[in-house]
Amino acid sequence: MEIELKYNIENKEQMTLIWEDDFLRSVEEAGSRESILMKAAYFDTEDFILSKNQIAFRIRKEGDKVMGTLKWRDKDVGISGLYMREEINIPVKDEACFLSPDPAIFMESSEGKDLIEVLDGAPIICIFETHFYRRKLRVDSEGTICEVSLDEGEIIADKGRAPISELEIELFSGKQEDMMKIGERMAEKYGLQPEPLSKYARGKKLTEKGE
């Protein structure tokens, strides 16, 4: 289960202030800060079979690593900016998978078998990409471990582009309430608004532009 908070960041100055925030520095794990270039491609069929079944299929390059990801069963938690969904990640050795992935990479999981069944042989295509720079650190607050990320870049689709500028806090272990407190503290201090749409949802919206 993936559980994360997302907030919109208005400008670069705000981004820098959050990255240098005294509270985050006081609770971060030593040596956990990292900056990395991220490039992701999202795949579906021409008639969006996966989207209609609430499945997101992503291949992402994280620096030198390539990861295949399936996300499904988004839950309406009734709190803007809070996302809860099932997720599996598979390391991918062949970088060509970024351009033309084989859904069979997930076959070792029951969800992968469901994916193959849903596709029923239909070819998949890249529907949009995300390119962004991520700065991240790990926080250990009262036994709850989270990853705090600052993402800056853009979503790229055939029908348009949209900026990425957001704070993301993902719960790794511990209490969801503690993660929420960190998010609320950052939001109040910097006047952040919850991000109501995930990168996937914003990208999907771009693919529908003008229809």
Image: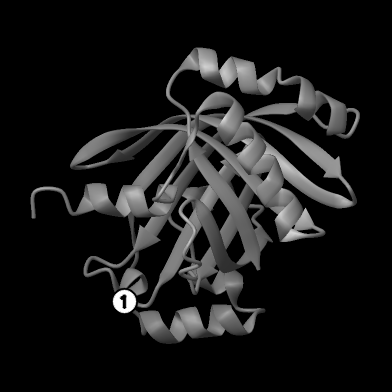
Relative vertical location of residue 149 with respect to residue 201 in this rendering, above or below: above
Relative vertical location of residue 117 with respect to residue 29 in this rendering, above or below: below
Q: Secondary structure at mark 1?
A: loop
| Front residue of this view, candidates 135 and 159 | 135
Task: Describe residue 188's horizontal placement relative to residue 171 as left or right.
Answer: left
Q: Which color scheme did the rendering employ for the protein?
A: one colour
The residue that appears at 49% across and 56% down in the rendered structure is 58
| Front residue of this view, candidates 171 and 21 | 21
Relative vertical location of residue 184 with respect to residue 122 in this rendering, above or below: above
The residue that appears at 26% across and 52% down in the rendered structure is 205
Q: Which quadrant does the C terminus fall into?
A: bottom left
The residue that appears at 37% across and 79% down in the rendered structure is 119
Amino acid tagged 1: Ala
Count of numbered circles on the image? 1
Relative vertical location of residue 112 with respect to residue 149 in this rendering, above or below: below
- Residue 15: percent from left, percent from top: 56, 21
- Residue 83: percent from left, percent from top: 53, 59
Q: Which residue is mark 1?
A: 122
| Front residue of this view, candidates 117 and 2 | 2
Q: Residue furthest front?
A: 188
Res 167 seen here: yes
The residue that appears at 72% across and 57% down in the rendered structure is 177
- Residue 4: percent from left, percent from top: 61, 53
